[in-house]
């Protein structure tokens, strides 16, 4: 179980090695006393970290937030008790009624914690890249293996309905071939629960070499997440209290599906509505004709 407020701090701790020395001092100040950091003025924060005021703001943007105000708001929400549920492990002797409560509470807890810790700046960058690729007719490839491969298929289904060229690839060999054919302006969206899959790490490295924008949905601090911290790429960290080695991930799948929904919604809102709305209406009309019964 991950304690309350630790998800955002874990994300900062994972990004620490990639930060410049001055910003590392700000990060350590956060990690040492998050509650004080959330309340102190920028001048005192800069003094305590032995840096300039602009460095404090740059640190907040480096770890994915819009600025100091956004960072402090999210930090205060993370360190204060505001999430009504905690993660509770299911037991072999649980009754069905117990399972209902625990599974639903675990899902609600994870979603609310993610809402408090999510960084709008990272989503803005991801959505901008996906919109640019879609409008230019370039490739958007979703990569995932196992359970994450199913999420990739869901993403492809949502994006192609927007009239955007998108593909989902879950076979390791095909993934490598697909990534090799990427070029600048294309987007490689890589989805992984653990962030340790060799196949997906290989895909990220190939996509990076080919100049494509790499958008990674995975756990903070994982090898795959570290690759996404390179300039020009985007990390959409999905941290949760579920064991990465769980045979059938549940909470992580819900988080990944929700992240895909956020990206899809953001892309849809930025595409040309005069073109998109008639397209969606035409698709709905065509599907309605395939129903056996109206209702």
Image (tube, rainbow, N blue to C red):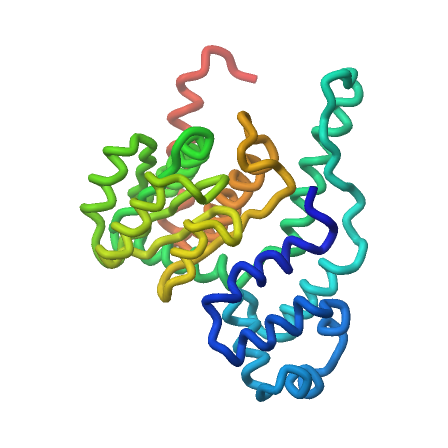
Instruction: From the top left corner, tell me how far across and down residue 191 is, in percent.
Output: 43, 42
Label count reads 0
State left or right for residue 10 relative to residue 19: right
Residue located 43% across and 56% down the image = 226
User: Residue 75, can we see it?
Assistant: yes
Tell which of 11 and 288 is nearer to you. Answer: 11
* Quadrant containing the C terminus in the rendered view: top right
User: Where, quadrant-wise, is the N terminus in this rendering?
Assistant: top right
Asked if residue 281 shows in the view, the reply is no
Could you tell me residue 62's position as x and y percent? 50, 70
Residue 93 in picture, x, y percent from top left: 77, 16
Identify the residue at horizontal 38%, vertical 47% (top origin): 189
List the single residue furthest toward the top: 292
Q: Position of residue 148 (x, y in %)?
A: 45, 34
Give 274 or 44, whichever is nearer the viewer: 44
- Name the one closer to the observer, 94 or 158: 94
- Which residue is at a point 29% across and 52% down the rendered structure image? 205
Q: Is residue 293 above or below residue 131?
A: above
Vertical position of residue 218 compared to residue 243: above or below? below
Viewed as shown, does residue 70 lie left or right of 15? right
- The answer to whether 49 is drawn above or below residue 274 in the figure is below
Determine whether, in the image, residue 158 is placed left or right of residue 89: left
Q: Measuring 26% from the left and 47% from the top, which residue is drawn there?
A: 139
In the foreground, 42 or 123: 42
Query: Is 251 on the left or on the right of 98, as rendered?
Result: left
């Amino acid at each position: 179980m991950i304690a309350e407020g630790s998800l955002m701090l874990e994300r900062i701790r994972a990004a620490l090695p990639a930060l410049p020395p001055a910003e590392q001092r700000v990060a350590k100040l956060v990690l040492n006393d998050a509650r004080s950091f959330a309340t102190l003025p920028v001048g005192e924060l800069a003094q305590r970290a032995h840096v300039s005021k602009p460095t404090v703001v740059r640190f907040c943007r480096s770890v994915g937030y819009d600025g100091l105000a956004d960072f402090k708001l999210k930090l205060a929400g993370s360190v204060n008790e505001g999430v009504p549920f905690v993660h509770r492990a299911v037991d072999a002797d649980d009754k069905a009624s117990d399972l209902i409560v625990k599974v639903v509470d675990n899902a609600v807890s994870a979603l609310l914690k993610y809402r408090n810790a999510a960084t709008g700046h990272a989503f803005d960058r991801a959505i901008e890249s996906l919109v640019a690729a879609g409008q230019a007719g370039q490739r958007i490839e979703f990569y995932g293996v196992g359970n994450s491969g199913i999420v990739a298929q869901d993403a492809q289904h949502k994006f192609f309905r927007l009239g955007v060229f998108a593909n989902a690839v879950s076979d390791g060999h095909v993934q490598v071939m697909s990534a090799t054919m990427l070029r600048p302006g294309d987007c490689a969206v890589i989805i992984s629960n653990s962030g340790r899959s060799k196949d997906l790490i290989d895909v990220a490295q190939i996509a990076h070499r080919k100049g494509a924008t790499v958008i990674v949905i995975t756990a903070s601090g994982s090898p795959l997440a570290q690759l996404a911290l390179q300039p020009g790429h985007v990390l959409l960290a999905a941290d949760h209290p579920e064991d990465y080695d769980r045979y059938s991930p549940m909470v992580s799948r819900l988080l990944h599906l929700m992240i895909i929904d956020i990206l899809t919604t953001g892309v849809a809102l930025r595409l040309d509505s005069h073109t998109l709305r008639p397209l969606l209406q035409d698709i709905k009309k065509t599907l309605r004709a395939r129903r056996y019964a109206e209702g």
